[in-house]
Amino acid sequence: MQKDMIRHITFLTLVLFTFLLVNLSSQPREKAIPSSRSSIQLEKNIIFNDSSSICYLSYRIPYSSLVFVKDDDKYSGGLTLDFEIKRDDKIVDRKSSSKSVVTDSYEGTLSEENFIEGVISLDVSKNDYVIKPFLTVTNTDRNIPLDSMLIQQKVILKEKFGHPIVVQSEEAPSCSSSDFQLVNFANSIPYSPNSYILLIPVLEENNEEIKVKIDQEGKNILDKSLTDFIDKDFILKECENKVILQKENNLKKVKYFLVKDFSYLMKEGNGRLMISVGNEKPVEFGFTVIWQNKPRTLMNPEFAIQLLGTIEKENIVDELLNADKKDYSKVLNKYWDDKIPNKKVAFNELMYEFYKRADYAMKNFGSVSNSNGAKSDRGKIFIRFGKPDEIKREYSTSNAVTEIWKYIQLKREFIFTDRTGLGNYTLD
């Protein structure tokens, strides 16, 4: 899988250097890009042992959702999560978790790739609970109520099966002998080229084989019998700012079956997991595949199609826009998938790279007269060729500012001039 990914990325680079070398045509139809996304991830997992069950509440919040204060050459931030645990409309317990973080740069405070993670535990063996979380962001007076979480005994188990737990396929942090790191993504599977594992709790002492089927939008993703399981108790704990599953005692009545090699075949959207033993009727679990770091310019499919005018002929863009609006996502995905035929994973690296560049252009190349930085001359060049190897800025006596972008490997140079002093750089 790793070799395939390396080849895929190499191919992606070559495709970008050739495919993006086309005209600078653009479309006049344009919409604002949605700017808000849910970034606070809360997850609950039930860990079973032979005599009881423990609920673990975990969280993951990106640095970009925190507020940092500069102290000398460092930036510090953090959070506190308070949980009110209610039974029969009465508060029976409170739990709290506080975290702090320090980063070396202002850019680090804006990161959506670095997270604060943590976990607390709650004994849920006998009762139903309502858990109300509150988030306090350090360096502010904000106390944000989050959505309540329900724990109901009748839905903790579906017959003999517990809800699957999504874990990483790579090794857990080195501070533990644990086999697994929790994905910690609100019980969802990230849409990515990576492979993830589902741990399926099965509460039946003599069962050593289950049948598993996974489908999505009518497509069969996985259909096989599994005999790979772990018969040890787990606890969830914090380790190097991650949440890990650490092995504890041997179990007699509980087994955790491992579902592998399926997640990179799945697209964004809902899926179904069906589990059965022998000839018994399958038990179904629903789950969601979410694009964790989806570019903002992809949030509005119509706008995303319009951005293709940066690299594509006008008639091609018009043809895509002539589709029914409800099908925009489908035709856009097909457009990009056709650029990489016979790819082995659902995730399209070329599409991701294009719209990641568009995001950067939107944010960094807008001006007073043109707020859409992706449609500016600098934005168009950035989307087509990526970040320059060198940028040189020159100033003239007439107050004009010139930027010279050099792409060494491509042997290309682009000169942009701002003659107004308002950031309106035009390609010379």
Image (cartoon, rainbow, N blue to C red):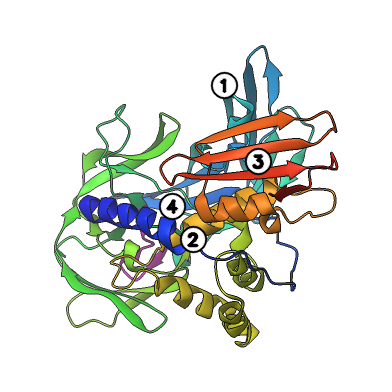
Q: Disc 3 designates what residue?
A: 65
Tag nearer the camera, 2 or 1: 2
Direction from residue 94 to residue 47 in the image, left or right: left
SS class, disc 3:
helix
Element type at mark 2: loop
Front: mark 4 or 2: 2
Q: What is the crowding at mark 1: few (fewer than 14 residues within 10 Å), some, or many (at least 20)?
A: few
Q: Amino acid at mark 2?
A: Leu
In the rendered image, residue 385, in percent from the top left (x then y), is placed at: 51, 51
Q: Nearer the viewer, mark 1 or mark 3?
A: 1
Q: Mark 4 Cα within 10 Å, few/some/many (few <14, many 20+)? A: many
Of callouts 4 and 3, which one flags the residue occurring earlier in the amino acid sequence? 4
Judge depth for marks 4 and 3 and give the one in front: 3
Q: Is residue 100 magenta?
A: no
Residue labelled with disc 2: 21
The residue at which mark 4 appears reads as 45
Q: Is residue 190 visible?
A: no
Mark 1–mark 3 CB contact (< 8 Å): no
In the rendered view, does 229 fall on the left or right side of 140?
Answer: left
Q: Which span of residues is magenta-colored?
A: 156-166
194, 187: nearer the viewer: 194
Regarding residue 357, the answer to whether it shows in the image is: yes
Q: Quadrant of residue 375?
A: bottom right
Q: Which residue is mark 1?
A: 104
The residue under label 3 is which amino acid type? Ser
State whether residue 138 is above or below residue 19: above
- Secondary structure beneath dot 4 equals strand
